[in-house]
Image: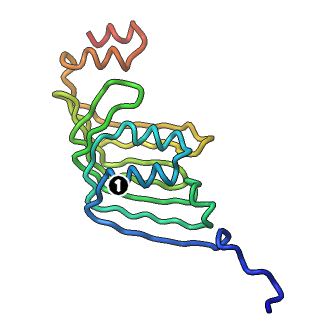
Amino acid sequence: NRSSPATPFSDYQWETRNYAKNIDFSQVKKACLLMFGDSEDIHDIFDDIYKSDIPEAELTFNGTLTDFSNMKNLAASAEVKNTVFKVPDTNILLTDGKGSLNIENAKLHGTNLTATLKNSFGTNGSFSLGLAEDDFSFKLNVDIDADLSALQGTIDELVELPSLQEEFE
């Protein structure tokens, strides 16, 4: 007979660290959508990534089972290559993407990123994207070696100001 009630299973504190190699991207997508299915941001991210090779990744978590759905309790890192993805809210498809991805404190960061668009290349890329419901931050830096004549439709889609569009013609 105990003098205090047993701790409910849902209140146990969990601390996990998982490593994986040669990860199937489609399975990662399924797992994330199951865990964070209510998060519009998670849906948006995975809707825009069509393919990726993930040679290695690490996932850590610290909290209770109910904390598991809170991005602030999750940390992850992965190397990606051969990634095909769409720039959000556009019809721009990038290929041959590679680099390092990291989730920490409900922010997605990318470093050492490269990608190809037609005859143009982005290198030395980095980005930061807020994943929490109250964090709308986004920052992108990339060096671009572009064939502007082949990208006119893309420029028109990305640049809204007509005067700036004219500068690219």
Label 1 neighbourhood size at 10 Å, few (<14), some (14-19), many (20+)?
A: few
Q: What residue is drawn where x is 57% and y is 60%?
A: 68
Which sits in the foreground, 62 or 142?
62
Element marked by disc 1? helix
- Which residue is farthest front? 1
Residue 152: x and y, percent? 25, 15
Q: Quadrant of the C terminus?
A: top left
Left or right: where 137 falls relative to 98 = right
Name the side, left or right, on which 39 lies relative to 58: right
Q: Which residue is mark 1?
A: 27
Please name the residue shown 40% across and 51% down the image.
30
Position in image of residue 109 (x %, y %): 43, 48
Compared across the picture, whether 119 is left or right of 9 comes to left
User: Can you say whether 58 is above or below 24 in the image?
Assistant: below
* Residue 31 spot, x, y in % from top left: 43, 55
Q: Quadrant of the N terminus?
A: bottom right
| Figure coloring | rainbow
Residue at 37% over, 43% down: 126
Looking at the image, how many numbered discs can be counted on the residues?
1
Where is residue 83 shown, x and y percent of the image? 26, 44
Dividing the picture into quarters, in which one does residue 167 lie? top left
Amino acid type, residue under disc 1 in the picture: Gln
Please, is residue 123 above or below residue 34 in the view? above
